[in-house]
Amino acid sequence: MSRAIAGPEIERLIQLLAKLPGLGPRSARRAALHLVKKREQLLGPLSEAMAVARERIVVCARCGNVDTSDPCGLCTDPRRDDGLIVVVADISDLWALERSGAVSGRYHVLGGVLSALDGVRPEHLSLDALVERASDPAVKELILALSATVDGQTTAHFITDLLAHLPVKVTRLAHGVPVGGELDYLDDGTLAAAIRQRTGF
């Protein structure tokens, strides 16, 4: 068992940082040390920003995004296409698509994907709200922007069946060779998907 090298306050900071994705105990210790060294420039402003975030951040009741207002800024943006809803598993997926600048429609965050192993069932996801939104005559297309994992594809098939009675067009993201990717480094599944979904040149 390792001994505590610093006081309990610093050790607690390290333990909390270690719970963040991508940070293990060693990375958390380095991050904590950096924050402590830069107390005035980083630690104070960071703690204030976190306190404000804790008070003001809410989940959008319409799409499931996080923002400081409900409905969120994406849902109230009049420049967005109401006829297009992009379905994502998590907020991180929404943010990734927004960074790409490729989406001009609305979003719907499911809150995860179906997973028998993890015990995630249809009632755990925001599926009823999705069906309700897709039933709006203004909605023409739903893009299923779910990962190409077994759970992601299972969820996509489940949603497709769920919406089969509606006149809305259901599409999914293309799978295949990434931009800048070299064929030699791609796995067999990605190459097979790229061949199946080839397009005209």
Image (cartoon, rainbow, N blue to C red):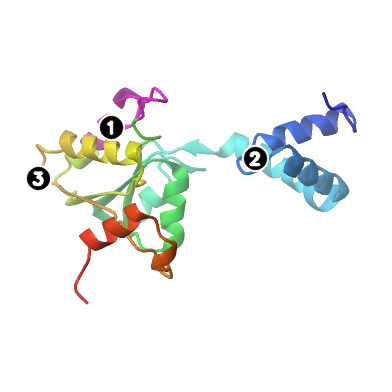
Q: Which mark is residue 127?
A: 1
Q: Amino acid at mark 2?
A: Val
The quadrant in which the C terminus is found is: bottom left
Count numbered badges in the picture.
Answer: 3
Residue at the image point whose x is 26% and y is 40% from the top:
156
Question: Residue 196 in the image: x percent, y percent?
Answer: 21, 59
Question: Residue 22 in the image: x percent, y percent?
Answer: 62, 44
Earlier in the chain: of badge 3 and badge 2, it is 2
Left or right: residue 43 versus residue 71 is right
Spatial separation of the CA atoms under disc 3 and disc 2: 43 Å
Does residue 76 appear in this view? yes
Give the residue at mark 2: 52
Q: Which mark is residue 167?
A: 3
Mark 3, secondary structure of its residue: loop
Left or right: residue 140 versus residue 68 is left
Is the residue under label 3 in contact with that under label 1 (CB below 8 Å)? no
Mark 2, secondary structure of its residue: helix
Is the residue under label 1 in contact with that under label 2 (CB below 8 Å)? no
Quarter of the figure with residue 200: bottom left
Q: Amino acid at mark 1?
A: Leu
Spatial separation of the CA atoms under disc 2 and disc 1: 31 Å
Depicted 163 relative to depicted 100: above or below: above
Residues drawn in magenta = 115-131
The quadrant in which the N terminus is found is: top right
Closer-to-camera residue (83/16): 16
Quick check: is 116 in the magenta stretch?
A: yes
